[in-house]
Image (spheres, coloured by chain):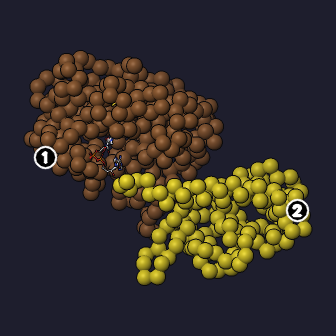
Amino acid sequence: MHGLDVTLEEHPFFAGFSPDQNRIVSGCARNHKFDAGHYLFREGDPANEFFLIRHGRVALEIVSPGQAPVVIATLGKGEIVGASWLVPPYRWMFDARAVELTRAIGIDAACLRGKCDADAQLGYEMMKRFLPVLVKRLNATRLQLLDVYGKR
Amino acid sequence: MAPPDARLEEPHTTDAFVPDLYRVEAVRRELSDTVTLELAPISGTRPAYAPGQFNMLYAFGVGEIAISISGNHESGNRFIHTVRDVGAVSGAICRSAPGDVLGLRGPFGVGWPVAAAEGSDVMFVAGGLGLAPLRPAILEVLENRARYDRVAILFGTRNPADMLFRHQLESWRQRLDIEVEVTVDHADPDWHGHVGVVPGLIPHVMFDPAETVAFVCGPEVMMRFTATALTAAGVASERIHLSMERNMKCAIGICGHCQFGPDFVCKDGPVMRYDRIAEILALREI
Ligand SMILES: Cc1cc2nc3c(=O)[nH]c(=O)nc-3n(C[C@H](O)[C@H](O)[C@H](O)COP(=O)(O)OP(=O)(O)OC[C@H]3O[C@@H](n4cnc5c(N)ncnc54)[C@H](O)[C@@H]3O)c2cc1C
Ligand code: FES
């Protein structure tokens, strides 16, 4: 059976991490299994863990009072769920629901923040990986906002 | 320039400005604002065409617009067109009923390089109504499936209710020899598919970028984002083909209405290679 450090190494997000860095991060990691319909987290909850999807699909939902939830994005194998753990006040801004059976690695945010503070190189490596994900999502959101399939 | 897969015959009329008369044989409502029409020539046979070419459809007394061909040879002596009601002319065409007569000039333009893509992986990326001009190319590739390596169809649309050609997508999805991924911009929780923009699907199906040929059709912004995502995934820009839209009048390269940089979309396109148009595509005023 694989240890968590091996599982992390195989995840595209950690490609290029040194074995030492991998060991440090896997010290903050644990495995999760979410059945279809179960929530990884809910809006407003403390963002004390983020997730790397190994298999399955996760829907990010926003709920307006009195209305049905709207799915704003889905994320699948190899993708990251959650960035709110990076920035104060460390609270989730949306719900994350497993659409199908989902296996993920959860990374304890306080643990990782502490390790990144103590090891600037590790912190930089994490940021180098997170920032492109965030920029890609920002661009995708801009395209969604344009409502390109609507009438001009 | 001759279309790559041209099987064109002589048009009926010798004057390229005079439309031939076509009878509306069938009308199928696809979406609340979109219909598919089957048009048969009132006399003679319809000219041959290549996937990706378009006709100028004329609603008498209203006007004439460019509409891509959305069917394949199985339609026999008919042209299949899928039209969205966005204004006066498309609205009039969408309101036609079986038995009505429309004018038709064409087919015109350069289509998808379906034959040139043989031996490659083929990725179709469609957004909204963009699936209609791609459909003849998809059907041709599927008909000659053994000539291509991997085939993927990526389709992005606004929401699950606005899904063009839903049944066809479902039947393609059941095939074991192609990958079909559909994404919507937003959905309610009953939707179990992808939510997000169509370029986001590219990494899910990308196999060997050096061997991939991409055919992209949809709103221009969507095509720009898609071409950027394809190049970021390693597909060379000369292997990416986009179907461009510009207002047209003559459709035969005379009036200049459809000018796009040094090219005319009506005769040098509508399907154009990304490496030839990338710079112009980024300019706001073109
Ligand atoms: C090569 C080519 C192939 C085409 N193929 C098809 C096709 O297969 N099916 C089809 O329905 N249309 C297709 N079009 C687009 C069609 O020709 C135009 O939408 C046309 O301008 C409609 O004319 P209209 O008089 O109805 O509306 P217009 O008066 O020209 O436009 C009315 C309003 O709709 C907006 N509008 C125009 N075009 C679009 C659009 N495509 N999407 C959203 N809003 C728009 C305009 O900005 C305007 O505000 C194609 C165009 C080209 C150049
Ligand atoms: S429409 Fe006249 S030149 Fe293209």
Residue farthest bottom in this picture: A66
Q: Which chain is yellow?
A: A
Residue A89, given in percent of the width and then of the height, sits at 71, 78
Question: Does A49 appear above or below B220?
Answer: below
> Alpha carbon of mark 2 to alpha carbon of mark 1: how far?
70 Å
Q: Quadrant of residue B56?
A: top left
Q: Amino acid at mark 2?
A: Ala
Q: Chain of mark 1?
A: B
Q: Chain of mark 2?
A: A
Badge number at residue B132: none
Locate the N terminus of chain B and report the quarter of the image it occupies: top left
Question: Does B132 appear above or below B268?
Answer: below
Residue hosting label 1: B97
Secondary element at image label 1: loop
* Residue at 54%, 58% in the rendered image: A142
Q: Amino acid at mark 1?
A: Ala
Residue farthest left in this picture: B99
Q: Quadrant of residue A102?
A: bottom right
